[in-house]
């Protein structure tokens, strides 16, 4: 009785797993297939499109050229995830310790960007970025301001789960009574105990920034996705090759990051996290 | 390794809390709260939840700021100092070990904050762990230890910095009964060995009475009575203390000329100047004895045993007098003569008693 039920569950799991796997892999495989087609009816497979990626300096360029889409996107990803953590972690800890009544308010503010369509955000950002471009800097890296807001809901959720798992109040009071300054409390006590939440938050930020198109395009900043789209207008094969390459690149990057976190952690946790991240990455990346 | 421990030879310091005030919005947690702990003394603050005992401790620790009053530790006014500058060791009710550090690293944390060198830090941490009997667990994480072990590490961590005051905020509440009494005695042993001035906050009267030099019974933001455990128990100063500390029978009676007459027995009053009128005498279960011989007619103190609770050396017998039930505490051997269903006569010992007036009576000022 229970044996057959377990069997059914097992089958259900595999069917779900395979269906979901196909859902994710088939489009990528199709893109790969398309990017390696030769010209003509029965032309043999060719990697010409892939080789051609290097010929587009606006895409990859030399590593020093920060105007190239991929470098800009990577820099933005780094700046955004670090800045988000620096702003959010102390705020959330402080609210938990001293202003618990404000928690709801902070939470709804943080989740707000999720409810506003990206295109509406652009309309709001537009005049600000005009001012920033004139008075501060017109570098593409100023996009980080917008991206911090964009990743806020995801980072908030990830950090909130991490902070909920530890007794922030007691731990910090214990550290305080042992002579720790607030900075030490944060750095030596809170941060090490929410490291997986920090990692989650930054993985989500990186994934979101690497896939962001709407805001960059409408504010006229050529990040990776914008370059891919503009390339598609002139050379579809190369643009698809780049798209596949960037997906693989993001995948490798996220896998690498998720293993940086903790050698002490079990592999099951790392995999679990990765699956979660990818599930979110897909919804985030298509914004 | 022998158990020779280099105990900090520092004699305890005097701690004074002077007219502390603390309000939360409209709620007054502490009202003109004053308490002086002698050097090396262990004072327990005992009271129901919300009585302000934890607030007093947190004000002393610097985890909260007083609205008024002073905190003086060893002659130094620390009222304005933040928690990390007060030199106070604290053990919390909930488990508070840093989860990412093993036991000895936890204990060494405070020493690191005081810029003690790495080797010295570890040596001293292991030493204090030995003091609390946990040296073999030095390399365990909190999740690898039982609740009692975690609290002992927390105690070691608090003591490692050689603080001027040790604060214990219901450190035993999360533990099960057996571990609790063992750790309670352990805390007392270590406290005496180190000789540190200690404030112990608890809602458990047994804990407070068992280990404190003096017990302060708190109610609604102030201390109702402060004294040695035996005094608080045997000579409660107020009805609140009488009812909060130990079990108490509430027996209706009548005050007349400095004594209260309860069901025909005249009991002297602790405060003989009480005005005449109806009152409730507060009588300890051990101030009542049972007899089942002689006249078992319908006297005012004759009733039936309805339950006998075996507590070990003593037993608690519940007697139904018709309109009220009375608890009687007896040696178990004596209680055996009165199983449930026995008809018994109560005898009240004529010790001075406290009285309470009916709570609903509006005459009380």
Image (spheres, helix red, strand yellow):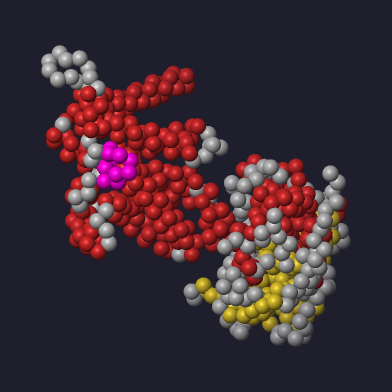
Residue B78 at x, y = what percent? 65, 75
Name the residue rendered at 75%, 46% in the picture: B134
Name the residue rendered at 70%, 73% in the picture: B73
Residue B347 at x, y = what percent? 82, 66
Left or right relative to B192: residue A233: left
Q: B119 above or below B296?
A: above
Q: Count the numbered circles shown.
A: 0
Residue B342 at x, y = what percent? 78, 53
Q: Nearer the viewer, residue B353 or B145?
A: B145
In the rendered image, residue B204 lying in the magenta stretch gets the answer: no
Q: B33 above or below A152?
A: below
Q: Is residue A208 visible?
A: no
Q: Please give the range of residues in magenta.
A: A60-70
Residue B59 at x, y = what percent? 61, 71
Name the residue rendered at 41%, 24% in the picture: A9
Q: Is residue A74 visible?
A: yes
Q: Give the main secondary structure of the magenta stretch.
A: loop
């Amino acid at each position: 009785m229970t044996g057959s039920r377990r069997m059914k569950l097992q089958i259900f799991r595999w069917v779900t797993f395979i269906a979901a796997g196909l859902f994710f892999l088939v489009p990528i495989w199709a893109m790969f297939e398309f990017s390696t087609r030769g010209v003509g009816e029965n032309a043999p497979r060719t990697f010409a499109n892939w080789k051609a990626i290097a010929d587009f300096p606006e895409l990859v360029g030399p590593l020093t050229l920060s105007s190239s889409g991929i470098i800009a996107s990577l820099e933005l990803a780094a700046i955004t995830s670090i800045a988000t953590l620096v702003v959010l972690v102390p705020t959330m800890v402080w609210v938990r310790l001293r202003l618990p009544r404000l928690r709801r308010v902070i939470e709804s503010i943080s989740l707000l960007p999720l409810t506003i369509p990206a295109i509406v955000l652009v309309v709001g950002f537009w005049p600000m970025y005009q001012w920033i471009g004139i008075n501060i800097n017109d570098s593409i890296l100023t996009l980080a301001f917008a991206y911090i807001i964009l990743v806020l809901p995801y980072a908030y959720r990830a950090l909130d789960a991490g902070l909920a798992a530890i007794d922030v109040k007691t731990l910090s009071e214990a550290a305080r009574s042992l002579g720790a300054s607030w900075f030490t409390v944060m750095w030596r006590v809170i941060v090490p105990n929410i490291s997986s939440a920090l990692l989650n938050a930054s993985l989500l930020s990186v994934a979101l920034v690497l896939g962001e198109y709407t805001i960059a395009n409408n504010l006229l900043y050529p990040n990776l996705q914008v370059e891919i789209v503009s390339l598609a207008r002139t050379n579809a094969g190369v643009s698809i090759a780049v798209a596949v390459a960037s997906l693989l690149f993001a995948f490798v990057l996220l896998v690498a990051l998720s293993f940086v976190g903790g050698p002490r952690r079990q592999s099951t946790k790392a995999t679990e996290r990765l699956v979660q991240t990818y599930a979110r990455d897909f919804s985030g990346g298509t914004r | 390794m022998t158990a020779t421990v280099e105990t900090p030879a520092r004699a305890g310091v005097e701690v004074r809390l002077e007219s502390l005030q603390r309000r939360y919005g409209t709620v007054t947690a502490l009202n003109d709260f004053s308490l002086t702990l002698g050097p090396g003394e262990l004072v327990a603050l005992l009271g129901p939840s919300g009585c302000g005992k934890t607030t007093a401790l947190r004000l002393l620790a610097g985890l909260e700021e007083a609205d008024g009053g002073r905190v003086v530790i060893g002659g130094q006014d620390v009222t304005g100092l933040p928690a990390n500058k007060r030199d106070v060791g604290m053990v919390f009710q909930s488990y508070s070990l840093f989860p990412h550090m093993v036991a000895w690293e936890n204990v060494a944390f405070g020493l690191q904050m005081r810029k003690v060198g790495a080797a010295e830090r570890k040596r001293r941490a292991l030493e204090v762990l030995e003091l609390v009997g946990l040296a073999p667990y030095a390399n365990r994480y909190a999740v690898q230890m039982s609740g009692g072990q975690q609290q002992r590490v927390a105690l070691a961590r608090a003591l490692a910095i050689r603080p001027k005051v040790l604060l214990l905020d219901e450190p035993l509440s999360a533990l099960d009964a057996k571990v609790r009494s063992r750790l309670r005695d352990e805390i007392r042993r270590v406290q005496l060995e180190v000789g540190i001035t200690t404030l112990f906050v608890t809602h458990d009267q047994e804990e407070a009475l068992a280990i404190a030099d003096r017990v302060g019974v708190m109610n609604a933001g102030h201390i109702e009575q402060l004294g040695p455990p035996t005094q608080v128990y045997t000579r409660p100063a107020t009805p609140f203390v009488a009812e909060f500390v130990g079990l108490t029978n509430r027996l209706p009676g009548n005050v007349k000329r400095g004594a209260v007459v309860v069901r025909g027995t005249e009991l002297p009053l602790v405060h003989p100047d009480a005005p005449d009128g109806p009152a409730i005498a507060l009588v300890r279960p051990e101030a009542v004895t049972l007899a089942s011989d002689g006249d078992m007619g319908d006297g005012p103190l004759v009733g039936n045993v309805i339950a006998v609770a075996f507590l070990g050396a003593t037993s608690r017998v519940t007697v139904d007098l018709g309109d009220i039930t009375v608890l009687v505490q007896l040696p178990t051997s004596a209680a055996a003569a009165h199983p449930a269903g026995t008809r018994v006569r109560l005898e009240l010992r004529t010790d001075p008693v406290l009285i309470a007036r009916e709570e609903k009576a509006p005459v009380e000022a």
